[in-house]
């Protein structure tokens, strides 16, 4: 994709259109009201947003300029549809994965297989990983595998349509539930304290060997 990075709201709007096309086909393409409700949905969203219809429509105009969203004519109510796969040059399976990453945040391949079931059915987790690796190998990449969190069995993946992940620390934090993040911080603090004790012991021993007064 030689286009600019998307804003968080633009990514949410685009992902909602992809999601609703499969989950509520009778209501798709979406009206501005339905699209706003999808963006502000409290379930299956991370982060949860609280945006106005005017903000959503502004994002829609930007996405139309990027050829990622189209206006559907012939209805009394203006409706919108996505042009995700063609606009970004990805297959339907990759479209489903990216949409779920934009809606729910970083996830493991197994979580993505489960969460994308209504958008695209993957045969197994390895097929999910195959598409994710293809997205990661693009230039520029559309997805990245995050550093595995301490104690985690699997690494999580994040989309890069909003730009690169700012730092490894943020990537790890994004991949951790809040309680695990707190536990990691406590473990790091304990390790620092143990290192200070060791250094003090070493200084005391060197001081004694040199016959110096502390």
Image (cartoon, rainbow, N blue to C red):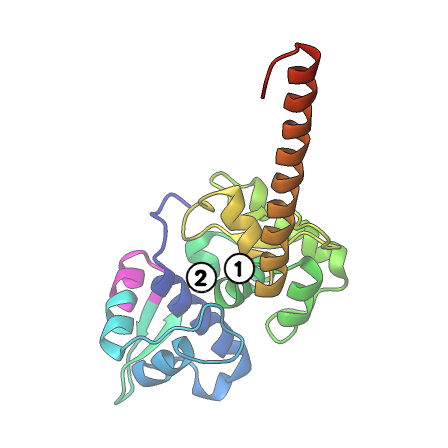
Question: Could you tell whether 93 is left or right of 48 in the image?
Answer: right
- Location of residue 164 with respect to 186 vertically, above or below: above
Q: Residue 194 is drawn in which quadrant?
A: top right
Q: Position of residue 1 (x, y in %)?
A: 42, 46
Which marked residue is nearer to the observer: mark 2 or mark 1?
Answer: 1
User: Circles 2 and 1: CB distance less than 8 Å?
Assistant: yes
The answer to whether one can see residue 142 in this image is no
Find disc 1 in the rendering and name its residue.
98
The answer to whether one can see residue 74 in this image is yes
Q: Quadrant of the C terminus?
A: top right
Start-end of magenta stretch:
60-69
Q: In this orientation, which residue lies closer to the viewer: 75 or 183?
A: 183
Decide whether residue 181 is among the magenta residues.
no
Question: Could you tell whether 78 is left or right of 39 in the image?
Answer: left
- Could you tell me which residue is drawn at 51 percent across and 85 percent down? 24
Which of the two discs, 2 and 1, labels the residue nearer the N terminus?
2
- Location of residue 36 with respect to 46 vertically, above or below: below
- Location of residue 138 with respect to 43 vertically, above or below: above
Q: In this orientation, which residue lies closer to the viewer: 75 or 162?
A: 162
Find disc 2 in the rendering and name its residue.
84
Structural distance between the alpha carbons of marks 2 and 1: 10 Å
Estimate how packed mark 2 is, as few (under 14), some (14 to 19) or many (20 or more) residues with alpha carbons within 10 Å: many
Q: Secondary structure at mark 2?
A: helix
């Amino acid at each position: 994709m030689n286009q600019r990075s998307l804003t968080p709201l633009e990514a949410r709007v685009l992902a909602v259109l992809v999601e609703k096309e499969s989950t509520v086909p009778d209501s798709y393409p979406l009206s501005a009201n339905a699209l706003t409700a999808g963006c502000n949905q409290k379930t299956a969203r991370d982060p949860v947003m609280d945006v106005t219809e005017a903000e959503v429509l502004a994002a829609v105009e930007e996405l139309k300029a990027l050829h990622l969203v189209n206006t559907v004519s012939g209805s009394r109510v203006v409706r919108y549809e996505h042009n995700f796969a063609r606009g970004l040059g990805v297959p339907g399976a990759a479209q489903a994965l990216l949409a779920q990453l934009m809606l729910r945040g970083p996830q493991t391949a197994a979580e993505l297989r489960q969460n994308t079931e209504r958008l695209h059915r993957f045969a197994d987790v390895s097929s999910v990983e195959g598409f994710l690796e293809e997205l990661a190998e693009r230039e520029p990449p559309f997805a990245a595998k995050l550093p595995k969190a301490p104690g985690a069995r699997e690494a999580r993946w994040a989309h890069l349509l909003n730009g690169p992940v700012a730092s490894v620390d943020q990537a790890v934090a994004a991949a951790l539930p809040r309680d695990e993040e707190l536990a990691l911080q406590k473990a790091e603090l304990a390790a620092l304290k143990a290192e200070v004790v060791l250094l003090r012991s070493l200084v005391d021993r060197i001081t004694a060997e040199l016959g110096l007064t502390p």
